[in-house]
C-alpha cells in the first residue's frame, strides 16, 4: 500500500503480543478460527468474491511482526491464515526487473546505507512532486539489490521487528509468483496475492513502464485471467485502465484522502479529486474498468478533529450499487494508528481496542480490509460473524 496512507508514519513504539492467537506450522491457521471462515470457496477460479468475508488481507505480509515485503512476512501471513497476501509493492530495477519494496526509495527499508560501495548512489529526486532523498531501486541492477537485506521500516513503532533486520533479501515479483505456486501446492489451498503498481506515471516517464512488465510476467505464469488468484491495484486510475487492456485479472483502484488528486490526474491536468471519484458518477466510471476500490478507512468512516470516528459515509452502499467491492486500508493494532476513541491510555507503544475498531468498520459492510496483523483481523472476523 502506498505513501498515501495518512496514518502511515506516526511515531511511537510497539509490542509484539499476538493477542492470544497461537500460530501453527507452515500449513496452520489461527486457533479458534471459525470453520466457515476458512471455507474452500476461495479455490482457484472463484474470483475475489468467493473469498471469506470480510476478507483479511495481509498488508505487505504480516508486517506487524516481520519487516514488510519479505518472504518472512509473506510466509507468516499465510501461516496465520490470511485470505490474501499483499505481495508486493512493485518497483523496477535499473535493468528492468520488478522487485517488492514499499517505495522506490529504499533507505528506510534496507541496509543500503551500510554499504559503502553504494554511498555515491544517494541522491535527491522529485517523486510524484515530493522532493525525496535516498537510494532508489531504479538506480540499481537486480544483482546489486540482491546484496542488500531488508530492515524494519518503522522501528520506533515496532522495535521487536528489528530482531529480523538483515535476515531476508529483497524479493522479485517473479520469485513471488513462484512462491505462490509452491505454497499453493504445499498447503493444498489456493494462495492469493494482491500486488500494487507503485508510481506508474513516474516510472513510465523514466522508460520503465510497470504495466507491460507486470502483464508479461503474469502471462508467463498463466496468471493473467479473470479467474487468476492475483488482484492488481494502483493509486493511479489510468494505470488500472491500462492494465484492463493488458490482462483479465481483477483490478482495484486505490483511493487516498478525499482532497487529494491521483498523480496521473495531476500530470494530465484532470482536475478531479478523490472526493469526485467516490461520488456515484466517479464510482460508475471506475466500475467500467475495475472490480473494486481500496479506499482509506477515513473514506468509509471519517474522523473528527479529535481523531474520533464519526458517522459512516454512503461509500460502501454507493460502491456496491455499481458492483464494486471495497477493501479499505489499513488496520493496525498499535495505539497511534487507531481512531482516538479506540486507543487505550496515552502510551504510544500499547495496543488499543483494535477489536472494537474492527467491529465498527465491519459493520459498514466492507468486503475486506488490509491489516498489518492478520491474526488479529481473523479473530475480529470470527467475533463479528458469530
Image (cartoon, helix red, strand yellow):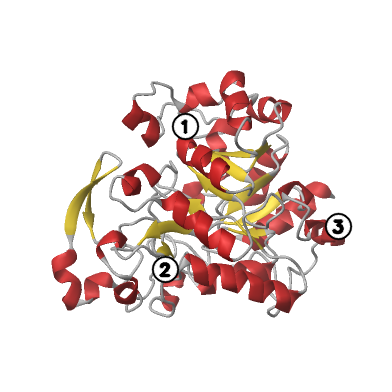
Is residue 228 visible in this depiction of the protein? yes
Picture quadrant where residue 19 is located: bottom right
Residue 182: percent from left, percent from top:
65, 76
Is residue 350 visible in this depiction of the protein? no
N-terminal-most mark, 3 or 1? 3
State which mark lies toward you, 2 or 3: 3
Return the residue nearer the eye: 118 or 32. Answer: 118
Picture quadrant where residue 348 is located: bottom left
N-terminal-most mark, 2 or 3? 3
N-terminal-most mark, 2 or 1? 2
Q: Residue at x 46, y 36 (%)?
A: 238
- Point out which mark residue 145 bears: none
- Relative to 204, 18 lies left or right: right
Q: Tag 1, which secondary structure? A: loop
Residue 132: percent from left, percent from top:
23, 49
State which mark lies toward you, 2 or 1: 2
Query: Is 80 located above or below residue 196 in the figure?
Result: below
Residue 297: percent from left, percent from top:
56, 38
- Point out which mark residue 306 bears: 1
Q: Residue at x 62, y 30 (%)?
A: 288
Query: Is 129 located above or below residue 346 in the figure?
Result: above
Return the residue nearer the eye: 286 or 381. Answer: 286
Query: Would you name the residue on which mark 3 appears?
Result: 36
Q: Label 2, label 3: how many angstroms apart (C-alpha)?
A: 35 Å
Q: Label 3, label 1: how many angstroms apart (C-alpha)?
A: 38 Å
Residue 225: percent from left, percent from top:
66, 53
Q: How many marks?
A: 3
Label 3 crowd (10 A; few <14 / some 14-19 / many >=20): few
Q: Residue at x 29, y 45 (%)?
A: 205
Query: Would you name the residue on which mark 2 appears?
Result: 159
Amino acid at each position: 500500500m502506498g505513501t498515501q496512507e495518512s496514518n502511515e508514519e506516526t511515531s511511537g513504539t510497539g509490542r509484539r503480543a499476538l493477542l492470544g492467537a497461537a500460530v501453527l506450522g507452515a500449513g496452520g491457521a489461527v486457533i479458534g478460527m471459525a470453520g466457515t471462515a476458512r471455507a474452500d470457496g476461495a479455490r482457484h477460479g472463484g474470483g475475489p468474491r468467493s473469498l471469506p468475508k470480510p476478507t483479511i488481507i495481509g498488508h505487505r505480509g504480516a508486517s506487524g511482526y516481520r519487516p514488510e515485503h519479505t518472504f518472512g512476512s509473506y510466509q507468516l501471513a499465510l501461516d496465520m491464515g490470511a485470505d490474501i497476501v499483499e505481495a508486493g509493492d512493485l518497483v523496477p530495477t535499473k535493468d528492468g526487473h520488478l522487485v517488492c519494496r514499499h517505495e522506490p526509495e529504499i533507505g528506510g527499508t534496507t541496509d543500503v546505507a551500510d554499504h559503502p560501495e553504494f554511498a555515491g548512489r544517494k541522491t535527491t529526486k522529485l517523486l510524484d512532486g515530493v522532493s525525496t532523498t535516498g537510494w532508489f531501486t531504479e538506480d540499481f541492477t537486480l544483482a546489486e539489490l540482491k546484496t542488500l537485506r531488508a530492515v524494519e521500516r518503522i522501528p520506533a513503532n515496532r522495535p521487536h521487528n528489528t530482531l529480523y533486520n538483515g535476515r531476508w533479501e529483497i524479493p522479485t515479483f517473479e520469485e513471488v509468483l513462484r512462491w505462490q505456486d509452491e505454497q499453493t501446492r504445499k498447503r493444498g489451498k489456493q494462495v492469493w496475492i494482491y500486488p500494487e503498481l507503485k508510481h506508474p506515471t513516474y516510472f513510465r516517464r523514466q522508460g520503465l513502464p510497470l504495466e507491460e512488465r507486470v502483464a508479461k510476467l503474469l502471462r508467463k505464469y498463466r496468471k493473467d485471467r479473470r479467474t487468476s488468484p492475483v488482484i492488481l491495484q494502483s493509486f493511479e486510475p489510468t494505470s488500472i485502465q491500462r492494465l484492463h487492456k493488458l490482462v483479465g485479472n481483477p483490478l482495484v483502484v486505490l483511493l487516498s484522502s478525499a482532497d487529494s488528486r491521483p498523480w496521473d490526474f495531476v500530470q494530465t491536468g484532470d482536475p478531479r479529486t478523490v472526493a469526485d471519484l467516490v461520488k456515484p458518477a466517479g464510482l460508475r466510471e471506475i466500475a467500467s474498468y475495475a472490480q473494486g476500490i481500496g479506499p482509506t478507512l477515513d473514506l468509509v468512516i471519517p474522523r473528527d478533529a479529535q481523531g474520533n470516528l464519526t458517522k459512516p459515509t454512503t461509500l460502501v452502499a454507493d460502491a456496491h450499487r455499481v458492483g464494486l467491492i471495497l477493501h479499505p486500508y489499513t488496520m493496525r493494532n498499535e495505539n497511534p494508528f487507531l481512531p482516538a476513541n479506540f486507543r487505550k491510555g496515552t502510551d504510544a507503544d500499547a495496543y488499543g481496542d483494535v477489536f472494537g475498531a474492527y467491529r465498527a468498520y465491519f459493520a459498514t459492510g466492507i468486503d475486506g480490509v488490509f491489516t498489518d496483523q492478520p491474526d488479529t483481523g481473523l479473530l475480529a472476523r470470527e467475533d463479528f460473524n458469530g
